[in-house]
Image (cartoon, rainbow, N blue to C red):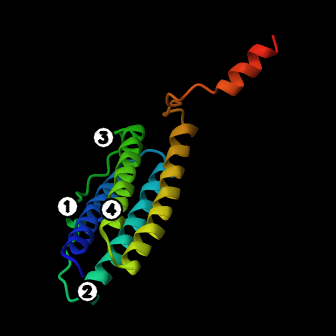
Amino acid sequence: MLSIEISHLFGNIQRNSLGAATLLGFSQVAERKEVRDYFLRGVEIAKKHVEIFSEVLESNDIPVPMGSDALVTDLAETGVLSDKLMLLHTTGMIALGIGFYGLSISTSTRRDIASHYVRLSGEIGLYLEDGANLLIKHEWLEEPPRMVDRAELIKTKGGK
């Protein structure tokens, strides 16, 4: 195994551990049940990714970094952070995670490692989409700026 592959696996384990701890904390203070459930689903996904990456390292006799679950306090007061803020932070974290997986794929020479990243990127992409849908549902996300649809513009002008 190449040192760059080890480095990326190690980093992705640490990021997922931190993400799981963050989402666990968010789930403790979320006001809406569906948002809380979304965070708990993310905790399970992150733990699964840590397990997969850890197995790759362990199968090559490489030490695995420790988790971050012990860093989560027992705070459970709602209203500490808004559901909107926590959800926006979470979707941003996920988008960054997909970017890190892409970087990891580009530097990996092993098919088995690259296939893990591809498969897991798809999984967290679907999770990210569900988060965006929650943001839209609660009207916490506005439509981002986009390019002008010239064909639609021409069609509406042509109809007048």
Q: Which residue is drawn at 38% across and 63% down?
A: 43
| N-term mark: 4 or 1 | 4
- SS at badge 4: helix
Residue type marked 3: Val
- Camera-near label (4 vs 2) is 2
Q: Quadrant of the N terminus?
A: bottom left
Left or right: residue 120 versus residue 21 is: right
Percent x, y of residue 91: 41, 47
Residue indicated by mark 3: 80
Left or right: residue 43 versus residue 136 is: left
| N-term mark: 1 or 2 | 2
Left or right: residue 62 versus residue 146 is: left
Q: Residue 71 carries which label?
A: 1
Residue type marked 1: Leu
Q: Residue at x 32, y 83 (%)?
A: 55
Left or right: residue 39 versus residue 107 is: right
Q: Identify the image quadrant of residue 87.
A: top left
Q: Are marks 4 and 3 in contact (CB under 8 Å)?
A: no
Question: How many angstroms separate mark 4 from mark 1 (CA)?
Answer: 11 Å
Q: Residues within 10 Å of mark 1 (few under 14, many from 20)?
A: few
Q: Is residue 156 above or below residue 102?
A: above
Residue indicated by mark 4: 20
Residue type marked 4: Ala
- Using the image as rendered, state which of residue 92 and residue 83 is in the foreground: 92
- SS at badge 2: helix
Residue indicated by mark 2: 58
- Camera-near label (4 vs 1) is 4
Q: How crowded is mark 4: few (under 14 residues within 10 Å), some or many (20 or more)?
A: many
Q: Are marks 1 and 3 in contact (CB under 8 Å)?
A: no
| N-term mark: 4 or 3 | 4
| N-term mark: 1 or 3 | 1
